[in-house]
Image (cartoon, helix red, strand yellow):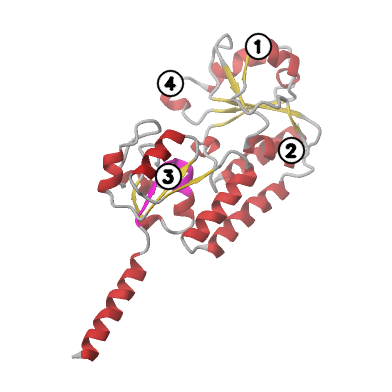
Amino acid sequence: MKYLNKLFFIFLFTINLMAGERIITLSPSINEIVFALESGNDIVANTEYCNFPEESKQIPKVGGYSNVSLEKLLLAKPSIILAQDYDKELILNIKKLNLNVQTFKTNNLKSIKTTIKSIGQILVKNEKAKELITGIDNSLESIKDIVSNKKILVVISPREDLNKIIYVAGNNLYFNDIIEASGNKNAYFSSSLSQPIVNVEKIIKMNPDIVIMLTPYINERKVSKDEIKQPWLELPINAAKKNKIYFIDKEYAGIPSNRVVNFINDYKDILVDVRDK
């Protein structure tokens, strides 16, 4: 009988080890990283915008960016909640519920790689984390010396009307790191950490050699690339004069996860086209 009891406890212990974590991911970036670390099956809930990979869409939702339900968090019975650090009030409220929440930064390449490594340690996926980080580093190596000393402007969610607010990538985001790694420079420069907002006059003054438009939701907006591009072609800037205005319309373009590798590869294609023109 004692022998059977011992076997039973060993069985329960083994089952618990195999069960893994009960993870909630509160951002698309973190969700993608967990899946890339091969722990997607342990995610018991995520947010409405966590839609990659495809199976993420079927996972129960706890809200969106600004309306995460604390009740749904509790009902999911997570062993750990993984989140980005931008919503301080939400994180504080989660901690008040005595839930295990870990926060991460993903604004630049260094923080993306640190986050991959940290989550890999939490989920005991260290080797896979190293593999993902190496992939990012190798991609960065591949974009060196294609073209150099070009001023590159990355425009976030551009619209066909240049009289409206124009958002561009600042100097504290992974876009800037990628531009610099390629031997070029961000046409926008500021020491400010806030989201850069510019107008037409500022763009003309910057005079970018290359403009890259990030348009991941262009189909939903029912507007064509030509409609967005045309007013830019009319500006007295080098990128317009030499027709070096490009689009990256994939959804991963604006998500700072391990899929930054995909963005780097798209960026590489642009540099090659600039070189070969």
Q: CA distance from mark 2 to mark 4?
A: 33 Å
Q: Is residue 188 above or below residue 124?
A: above
| Helix, strand or loop under label 2 | helix
Quarter occupied by the N terminus: bottom left
Q: CA distance from mark 3 to mark 1?
A: 35 Å
Task: Name the kind of residue labelled 1 in the image.
Answer: Val
Task: Name the kind of residue labelled 3 in the image.
Answer: Phe
Task: Name the kind of residue labelled 2 in the image.
Answer: Glu
Considering only order in the chain, which callout, 3 or 2, is on the residue closer to the N terminus? 3
Residue at (73, 12) in percent of width and height: 236
Depth check, front residue: 62 or 137? 62
Considering only order in the chain, which callout, 4 or 1, is on the residue closer to the N terminus? 1
- Is 22 situated left or right of 142 in this image? left
Quarter occupied by the C terminus: top right
Residue at (35, 69) in percent of width and height: 18
Residue bearing the label numbered 2: 180
Residue bearing the label numbered 4: 222
Tell me if residue 29 is in the magenta stretch.
yes
- Is 54 situated left or right of 200 in this image? left
CB atoms at circles 3 and 4 under 8 Å apart?
Answer: no
CB atoms at circles 1 and 4 under 8 Å apart?
Answer: no
Residue bearing the label numbered 3: 52
| Helix, strand or loop under label 1 | helix
Q: Is residue 123 above or below residue 210?
A: below
Q: Which mark is residue 200?
A: 1
Name the residue furthest left.
1
Considering only order in the chain, which callout, 4 or 3, is on the residue closer to the N terminus? 3
Residue extent of the magenta highlight: 22-32
Q: Nearer the viewer, mark 3 or mark 4?
A: 3
